[in-house]
Amino acid sequence: MPETGTNRHALLVFEFLRYITGYHQSSTRPAEGEKGQKINRVGLACPSADMTTDKEQFIDDQSPAVFKNGIDVTPNKDGGVCKVVKKWGEDGDRPMIGDKVAVHYTGKLLNGKKFDSSMDRKKPFTFNLGKGQVIKGLDICVSSMQRGEKCMLLCKPEYSYGLAGCPPKIPPNAMLQFEVELLSFKGELLTEDGGITRRIKVKGEGYNNPNDGSTVQVHLEGHCGDRLFDSRDVKFVVGESEDMGVPLGIDRAMEKMQKGECCMLYLKPKYGFGKEGRALYKIGPNSDLVYEVTLSNFEKAKESWELDLKEKLDYSAGAKQKGTQYFKAGRYLQAVVQYQRIVSWLEMEFGVGKEQQQTVQNFLLVAQLNMAMCYLKLKEYALVVENCNKVIELDERNEKALYRRGEARLFRNEFSLAMSDFKLVLQVNPSNRAARSQVSICQRKIWEHHEKDKKIYANMFQKFAEHDVKAGTGKRKRVDDCVVMSQNHHVGIKKRHRSQDHCEGCS
């Protein structure tokens, strides 16, 4: 219909009302909003054809005017969470389920009364997204945001504190409004050393996870930099992924995943293909890897408490053999996984017959000694000492445990402790020439250490002495200067007096 003067006047009035009620936004963004929604002239996302209308989104007359044209960000589009962008964020990805996010927020009731604010505490609030650590509406909203974005958020009761509310600050059946700013987000760390990071793209089903020994079916897509080097469906046993050319990091992540889950795994070299790389995939040494992993299905293995002693001993024999195989191939972390299995199966076995108890103890000794050797190769010396200590608790005269603990302590520059271990080895086996040689090395290291300390302290005392001499000289010089200045001052005064007397006489 042609635009008449009356229509044009009405349009101008409408735009003015939009401005004063808070709808005005900077129109510096591109013409596309979230999920392809078109952006109007004042920068707000207009509902597209597949979105519910404003009336369908919010039929509650108590809703603040600023939210009337907001974006419904609920997955099922029931209008329970409405968002209005105040400041656009950085272009890029958004937080995923399980990510650790940091936000600033201020929460208010509809009457404008503030009930909570991280700004007042002057400290960002952090939580893991999608894990039920915050109200449902905040989880949903933050998952739609970009880093640096600031928005207004309106949550219906079913997406906040429900019928009960949260007395005394939040009354029953209350709608809440928030101002939220997404400061940062990062993936979930699956290991203490930060070697495996997970970001969940699609949440899995239920609460059941594969356990050690489970048979899993997964789809993998592996990237090194921008290059896709692996894409396949593969089936393997958790703890034995190396047999199928699957990196250890994926193997270790399985016990955290659920059926149907799709996630991104970011692997440091230790959990990828290590310092050797993988020629088959043209992966160089010490390369970071990124895998997209989908857990299609899995069949759980029996838990340790479901196994009888015979089954545990049979499984331990297999794990020992597999661990030796990995060790010889230089896959030390994979070997550790096998030896840890033995410990988890047998360390709590008590009250069995004497012969069976000896068999259990022998398996434990071998597993922990072999783990110590693996950790020596990996230069994880604290873990070497820890595993050797466990062996020595069972057998205080164990020659291998004492020797390997001594090696680890020597590498840690704990020369006296290392020498004590090697001397204990000689008490157990006086003909152990390697231990005798290590004692000599420890003695030399201790002597070198003492000589180095003597030089350090000698130099230190020399510097102190030089400093004191300089300080003393400087002090005397300052005193002499003060005396000279004082004398000059008095001479100057006398000269001025004589000059004044002469002038007075001339007048």
Image (spheres, rainbow, N blue to C red):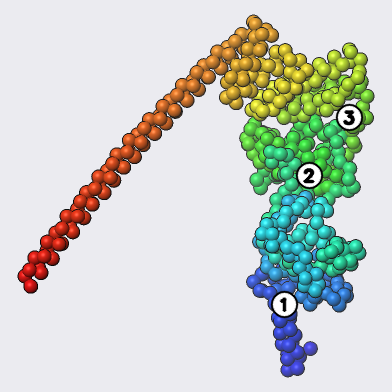
Position of 385 relative to 354 (above/below): below
Quarter of the image where the C terminus is located: bottom left
Asked which quadrant contains residue 258, the reply is top right
Q: Do the residues labelled 2 and 1 touch (CB within 8 Å)?
A: no
Residue in the foreground of this view, choosing between 34 and 392: 392
Q: Mark 2 points at which residue?
A: 293
Q: Name the residue under label 3.
A: 304
Asked which quadrant contains residue 471, the reply is top left
Q: What element carries label 2?
A: strand
Q: Earlier in the sequence, mark 3 or mark 2?
A: 2
Task: Tell me what residue is drawn at x 15 percent, y 62 percent.
Answer: 496
Q: Mark 1 points at which residue?
A: 22
Amino acid type shown at disc 2? Val
Asked which quadrant contains residue 70, the reply is bottom right
Q: What element carries label 3?
A: helix
Amino acid type shown at disc 1? Gly
Q: Earlier in the sequence, mark 1 or mark 3?
A: 1
Q: What mark, if any, has residue 149 been given in the picture?
A: none
Task: Tell me what residue is drawn at x 82 percent, y 43 percent.
Answer: 257
Position of 302 relative to 26 (above/below): above
* C-alpha gap between disc 3 and disc 2: 27 Å
Q: Position of residue 183 (x, y in %)?
A: 68, 58
Residue in the foreground of this view, choosing between 153 and 339: 153
Q: Are marks 1 and 3 in contact (CB under 8 Å)?
A: no
